[in-house]
Image (tube, rainbow, N blue to C red):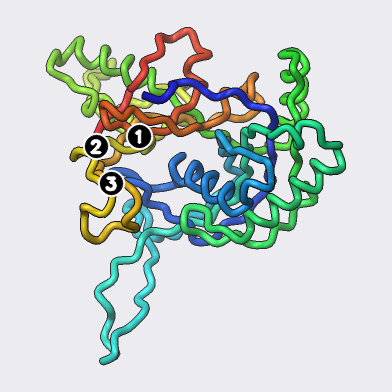
Amino acid sequence: MSQRKLPDIDALLHIPQLSVQNANAISGPHSWGHPGPTHFTGLMTALERKLGPACGLHFVAVGIVSHGYQAQTYGDYVQRFKLTRNPVGKDGATAAIVEEGRIHLQLSLLFGLQLDEARRAATDEELDGLAHKVGRTLQTLRIAGGSVLPGHSRLQPRLIRLDESEDVRAQQFRRLRRYLLPGYALVARDELLHAHLATLRQEAPDATLLDAWLDLSRINHRPVLGDEGRIEWQHGRAGGRGWIVPLPVGYGALSPLYGAGSVVGTRDDCTPVRFVESLYSLGEWLSPHRISDYRQLLWYPTHDAERGVYRCRNDYQAANPTEHHSLGVIA
């Protein structure tokens, strides 16, 4: 079983103000909107492979900061995706292809890195050159299926080697944090799911995690008897809870792990494969100035081979006084 905590990090790589066109807005079967953390941990792996071992960088975590978005939808109360009807078949008829929903993004990424010996001893000029190389390489990749457009920001990629002192690291992050504003960082709030489940079970003892997740993922309107005997409708989203969103955080196994080449139609014949379903939890969009430690911002992949759980984790909730639950997910 993998270790359920963020690995040690030697440096932070800030990629500022990326413009992404036509990213996938449907990251799971039950929600739509901004791509989930699995899209960006996948980008992290693809970027490391593209750079190659000679680059001397090992990507272990990624932070997601959104500066703006534009969902490709239309409608007033009911939103519908703007879909295209291409390509057409040989006879000119529309092909039987269901296009995914799309969204335009403006975001910054913060990668947590482990450096090899040569990069640890590198000069600041060499690290700046390496950061620009990573930024140029990232522009050749897809982010959640979307294309990276040339940016217009004056900010440049920065690679910051973290100091051994925790106090100095905190100062480094405070300086870096200013370049993430204005924006909203995505953090995990698994503990809210369990707290709301306990609240629901006071009235409905048979309530499940799915009931709690659905209740927090929508706006519920309930009739309340007013002072004059009139019925008033009130929504269940109390003020001060923050920007809470349903979030796909990984995958859970539906089948045993099959040997390489034993399942027809897989991507390659060299990798074991198993069938999975999406795992959901809760996340929160939080202004970066409310985050005091860079570790609270980063998402990192973990897996539990025995239980068949492959999910992304974030340590923001562990810094709060609320009890931390290790799983906190629903399938």
Crowding around mark 2 (Cα neighbors within 10 Å: few <14, some 14 to 19, many 20+) is some
| Element class at badge 1 | strand
Cα gap from disc 2 to disc 1, whole angstroms:
8 Å
Cα gap from disc 1 to disc 3, whole angstroms:
13 Å
| Element class at badge 3 | loop
Tell me which residue sits at (27%, 32%) in the image. Answer: 308
- Do residues under tags 2 and 1 come within 8 Å of each other at their CB atoms? yes
The amino acid pointed to by label 1 is Tyr
Horizontal and vertical percent position of residue 242: 48, 26
- Do residues under tags 1 and 3 come within 8 Å of each other at their CB atoms? no
> Residue 58, relative to residue 50: is it above or below?
above
Q: State which mark lies toward you, 2 or 3.
A: 3
| Element class at badge 2 | strand
Cα gap from disc 2 to disc 3, whole angstroms:
10 Å
Of pointers 2 and 3, the one earlier in the residue sequence: 2
Q: Nearer the viewer, residue 117 or 20?
A: 117
Q: Quadrant of the C terminus?
A: top left
- Circle 1 is placed at which residue position? 310
Q: Residue furthest bottom?
A: 91
Q: Nearer the viewer, residue 88 or 205?
A: 88
Which label belongs to residue 7? none
Identify the image quadrant of residue 36: top left
Which label belongs to residue 273? 3
Of pointers 2 and 1, the one earlier in the residue sequence: 2
Which label belongs to residue 253? 2
Tell me which residue sits at (50%, 12%) in the image. Answer: 320
Crowding around mark 1 (Cα neighbors within 10 Å: few <14, some 14 to 19, many 20+) is many
The amino acid pointed to by label 2 is Ala
> Residue 129, relative to residue 116: is it above or below?
below
Of pointers 1 and 3, the one earlier in the residue sequence: 3
Q: State which mark lies toward you, 1 or 3.
A: 3
Horizontal and vertical percent position of residue 39: 46, 46
